[in-house]
Image (cartoon, helix red, strand yellow):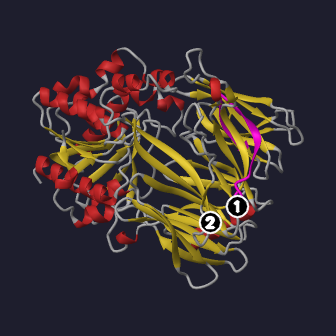
Amino acid sequence: MGASAQSALAANDAAVKFGAREAVESASLSPDGKSLAIIQPTGSRGSVLLIANLTGTPELKPILAASGTPDHLYSCGWATDTRLVCGIYVLQMDAGQPTGYTRLITLNSDGSDMKILSARTSSDALGVARGGGNVIDWLGDDGGAVLMTRTYVPQESVGHLMADSREGLGVDRVDIKTLARKTIEPPKASATEYISDGHGKVRIMAIQPTTNTGYDGKRTLYSYRKADSREWLPLSTVIYTGVTSTGFEPYAVDPDLNVAYGFDDKDGRAALYKISLDGSMKKELVFARPDVDVDDLVEVGRQHRVVGVGFAGEKRTTTFFDPTLSAFSKSLSKALPNQPLVSFVDASADESKLLLWAGSDIDPGRFYLFDKTTKGLTEIMPVRPQLAKTPLSAVKPVSFPAADGTMIPGYLTLPPGSDGKNLPAIVMPHGGPDARDEWSFAWLPQYFANRGYAVLQPNYRGSTGYGTSWFQKNGIQSWRTAIGDVDDGGRWLLKSGIAAPGKIAIVGWSYGGYAALQSAVLDPGLFKAVAAVAPVTDWQLMIDRHQNYTDYKLLQAQIGSGPNVTEGSPARNAGRIKVPVLMFHGDLDQNVAIEQSRVMKSRLEAAGGKVELVEYKGLDHQLVDDTVRADMLDRIDSFLRANLGL
């Protein structure tokens, strides 16, 4: 077994500050714009729901709490001016496997009259609905009900005859006071998603047919309805090849324009399109970029009105279609010149009041309330108040050459006040691998910059955001290219003089943890120490673990087979790793089983390697616990200092 987290030395002050969770985990504005609901952390891993009256004394009143063990409070939204709907997530061991369950509850804004909104499962049910449903329409014109998805589970009666054979995902209309339910969309066994128009009509449905062996298929079939019809008509087909997806994938419906907005390919990059839902199926390009994927549909208000589109080049940019918000965005950039990253969090029903978040690389962000009537902009709360007096580091977009001459984009974070030369350095590959790093505040690289390290975050080939040719066959099947780019980032740090000779390490989380370990397999002498959080270490082990899950065939297609599985798994090549390894893992990790780290530790020990594994009890993939994160940061810092000779 690995070392006990409970026996760790006290974390240093920087680890405590940077390891703390954000002070605002979720925020929402009531329909009348007079009340604010905020989820804040409490204790080490708990959360509390606070209500603020924006028209009176700005006092936060707690009305609901979750301990974090095993219950987590993950979202709250206003159904009416006085009643909320909140999501509870429970993580526990079930039949020897970490399993998560979600349920929705509803309660008054003073904490009274709390009820379970999710449909209860009968004792005669032939299964358990792990998901408690999601609100897809707040029915703002109604005021007393919501549309929410529901997983129907068949039930049996005496004699084992089916009393209710309905099965699959459907949509219910639920009264939030009486809990009276009405089926709006009957369940379909292969349904995966429903999209409403924000005004009470379900307009789009997604069906993912299963294979004849019961696994998820590679096709998702989207259907739509005309505005005045209940008949489902074919909209598009998205095909997942195991590497990329092809086809128009809808995200939202605009009832005024009677179109579906969604993303599809244009010249090898994702672009925003709209398709008419009047029967003509007219498809129009809305927005595209020649350099990067368009990846964000910007929506505002309770009806999720589409107002713009977002994409990330060196920095994230939003282009607004709505002229009023476009003008507001320009004035906001003048009012908040040091916080160029802005997102709309929520709005009152009439959109006269907007809840905003704004931040930058050196500002973790703040929440603001904008009143269109008075033109007043009021700061509500900083996201990380504990860092208010801590110097933060500017994040610089950079690029470096790979071995084949390809320029790899990334971000460099240097210690505050540093000249950027002769520093201990860390290469920090992102997770995913279907992801990318962006210009923003991030607590991991900022912590290590604060401790004196230069940190490089490479967007290696296999990252998303740069089109299909950059993505290649993903960072798993094309691991040699992806890990080669990561290693070339380390070589660039040394060659450019940023990293001091012999003072370079690699740190990663999830796929980034895999990349950290595999980098030491590909080039055993480059990095002098490896720290990996929740890493994948054996791809075949990952495939085998999913044999009893419906996504087995899709995961198998993503990972592939043959030499890339054997040669690309660090646990199968542990003998090539010649430097000290430190790993961390939560024992309830559903994304990457803790078995992955345990196997890696065993293989390294068998090969005579130096390795330590720290296991954290009762935690999932993200290690959402202030004390645990501080402990982990402190341990990594001490580990790197010892092995880099600092």
Question: Residue 305: image x %, image y %?
Answer: 73, 54
> Disc 1 on helix, strand or loop?
loop
| N-terminal-most mark, 2 or 1 | 2
> Disc 2 on helix, strand or loop?
loop
Residue positioned most to the front = 158
147 up-or-down from 323: above or below: above
Query: Where are the magenta residues, as a range?
Result: 176-195
Q: Is residue 283 magenta?
A: no
Amino acid type at circle 2 is Asp
How many numbered badges does the structure rendering display?
2
Which residue occupies 58% across, 28% down?
A: 245
Q: Quadrant of residue 53?
A: bottom right
Q: Nearer the viewer, residue 629 or 564?
A: 629
Q: Which residue is mark 2?
A: 113
Amino acid type at circle 1 is Lys
Verify CB contact (< 8 Å) between mark 2 and mark 1.
yes
Q: Separation of disc 2 and disc 1 at Cα?
A: 9 Å
Q: Quadrant of residue 599?
A: top left
Using a 10 Å C-alpha cutoff, classify the residue at mark 2 as few (fewer than 14 neighbours), some (14 to 19) or many (20 or more): few
